[in-house]
Amino acid sequence: MRSINQIMADVKSDWKKPYYGAVPYIDALSRCESITDSYGFDDVVSLINYFLANATYWRGAKAREIKKELNDMLKAYKSNPEQFPKGKRIIIYGLV
């Protein structure tokens, strides 16, 4: 399973002009490695869900592949969270 920041690197390379609503989630997830990380006050699971909700305008084969990978990761985490190592907390200066 790839890390979150590796997946977001692929998103950035494929989605040249992302929908403005997806940009903050792409940026945040680019700093995360695992689905168990937290970014500021948000967990990565929430960030992935928000990204997917804002990525409906991203289309094509690569988009479908990455969205499926993220959805599969969410399903695996929800069915058995113990299989994922404990994540780190990413502090955003000014918020935490």
Image (cartoon, rainbow, N blue to C red):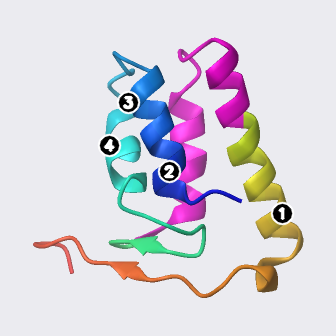
Q: Residues within 10 Å of mark 2 (few under 14, many from 20)?
A: some
Highlighted magenta segment, given as a residue range: 42-67
First in sequence, mark 1 or 4: give its number. 4
| Magenta-colored stretch includes residue 52 | yes
Which element type, helix, strand or loop, lies under badge 1? helix
Q: Earlier in the sequence, mark 2 or mark 3?
A: 2
- Residue type, mark 1 in image: Ala
Q: CA distance from mark 2 to mark 3?
A: 21 Å
Residue holding disc 3: 21
Q: Are marks 2 and 1 in contact (CB under 8 Å)?
A: no
- Residue 24: which disc? 4
Q: Residue furthest left?
A: 94
Give how far apart the Cα atoms at labels 3 and 4 are.
7 Å
Q: 71 or 40: nearer the eye?
A: 71
What's the residue at 60%, 88% (across, down)? 86
Side of 52 where 67 appears, left or right: right
Tell whether position 23 is magenta. no
- Reading the chain from its start, which is encountered first: label 2 or label 4? 2
Residue 84 is left or right of residue 23, and the answer is right
Q: Label 1, label 4: how many angstroms apart (C-alpha)?
A: 25 Å
Real-space CA distance between mark 2 and mark 1, rounded to the nearest whole angstrom: 18 Å
Using the numbered discs, state the Cα–Cα distance from disc 3 to disc 1 in whole angstroms: 26 Å
Q: Give the quadrant of residue 41.
A: bottom left
Q: Which residue is mark 2?
A: 6
Residue 33, percent across and down? Answer: 49, 66
Label 2 – label 4 distance at C-alpha:
17 Å
Give the residue type at disc 3. Gly
Neighbour class for label 4 at 10 Å: few (<14), some, many (≥20)?
A: few
Q: For marks 2 and 1, give the one nearer the viewer.
A: 2
